[in-house]
Amino acid sequence: MSGIAVAILLGSFILLILMRVPVALGLAVASVLTGFYLGVPLEVVGQRMLNGLNSFSIMAIPLFIFAGEIMGEGGISTRLIRLSNLLVGRFRGGLAIVNVLSTMFFGGITGSAVADASSIGSIMIPMMRERGYDTDFAVGVTCTGSIQGVLLPPSHNIILYSLAAGGVSIAGLFAAGLVPGIGLGISLMITSYIISIRRRYPKGEKIPKEERLRVIWEGLLGLTTALIIVSGVLAGIFTANESAAVAVVYALIMVTLVFREVGFKKFHSIVLGTFRKLSVVLFLIAASQAFSWFMAYLHVPDMVMSFVTGLSSNKYVILLLINIILLLFAMVIDMAPLILIATPILLPIAVRVGMDPIQFGVMLMLTLGIGLLTPPIGAAIFVGCSIGGLSLEKAYKAMLPFLAVMFVVLMLLTYIPAISMTLPRLLVH
């Protein structure tokens, strides 16, 4: 009986995904069908969905999304690009390095890879093309650079993981993502520089001396949002929810009173955009909680654990298998739902072989971030291709050197705990 129920749960979900049904709806329908088969009252499924939303930590998600929307529409991306150009634009292939550094800065504000690819890419890809860079290279740099946003605070995907993992410290996760996120950015910059030398791409244009102080000042004002979130949470001044609320207030002051780029009409569109994203996220959380409850009820995590540990008892092999499983699923399921689905299944396996839940969370972020660059679901690569007017095949080929670097960073993050765990142990108590 349980075998048939598992087949209904997973089979119906996979079938609905192949039929291009939205993931959240697929999770809900699969849960209802499994409930009917098992004789579980529909009210129980509804209760599980509502319980998934009954969490104090969830309050941070709409606030972080709102702050990201405000900063994204308030001209912050342009100011961060100018600051990045001042810092690193003088090198060979300077615009490519600026692209990566800008997405690192902007990722510390939005926490979203797709938002980074869209906001920074809409400016940088046409600019790089005008300055003599190949379109495929510009798209590849933009898409891979955007993945920094899933590691750096205030990534709302990290908050989703904390929820799915049963309340792992958000402050610890924020601290754990800093070194890998910055390290990934530096690795991508070095790769961009090497490719730029080989292809003889130009240096960036110098910013006039009389403009430099203004560029630095406006760029730092934009970055203060990320600084408020990171320092407040890590120092114990704010909870994640409080830091998100403070970030919203600060972002509103910046874009309305200081930069004056958001009026009533634009603010109205920001609010609508926030509610559209939030409705998707909340329905996804609710549906995934019902789906996860049925997986636990049917002992699916135990089955997966038995399968993986049956293949090998070696810790390093098991961790590699987890990465491979996640990468394969990331090709067909978007990041947020996969966090909620995979965490209850794979986290116990990782913990069993000695991995800290915080380290697993950061590893999960990077692994699924790479999935955002792989077809057929890769949202970040589709955004980049759309902006650059480039075919998926050409973009993917251009990204291969960057993907190779990202995979090396992922392996280091998987097998060297100190990379992600040093800061949490020092800063979070």
Image (cartoon, rainbow, N blue to C red):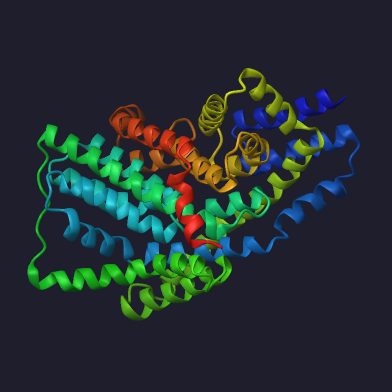
Count all numbered tags in the image, as a single digit.
0
* Residue at horizontal 49 percent and vertical 74 percent from the top: 246
Pick whichever, 387 or 39, lies toward us: 39
* Residue at horizontal 57 percent and vertical 40 percent from the top: 355
Determine if residue 280 is in view.
no
Task: Give the percent coordinates (x, y) of residue 245.
Answer: 53, 72
Determine if residue 194 is in view.
yes
Residue farthest to the top, as pictured: 311
Task: Give the percent coordinates (x, y) of residue 281.
Answer: 60, 53
Decide if residue 364 is on the left or right side of residue 260.
right
Task: Give the percent coordinates (x, y) of residue 176.
Answer: 48, 52
Above or below, comparing residue 327 to residue 95 in the picture: above
Decide if residue 310 is on the left or right side of residue 243.
right
Q: What is the quadrant of the N terminus in the image?
A: top right
* Residue at horizontal 55 percent and vertical 42 percent from the top: 360
Above or below, comparing residue 318 to residue 132 in the picture: above
Task: Give the percent coordinates (x, y) of residue 262.
Answer: 38, 73
* Residue at horizontal 9 percent and vertical 44 percent from the top: 202
Pick whichever, 360 or 143, lies toward us: 360
Q: What is the quadrant of the C terminus in the image?
A: bottom right
Pick whichever, 388 or 46, lies toward us: 46
Query: In terms of image quadrants, where is residue 92?
Result: top left
Above or below, comparing residue 398 to residue 229 in the picture: above
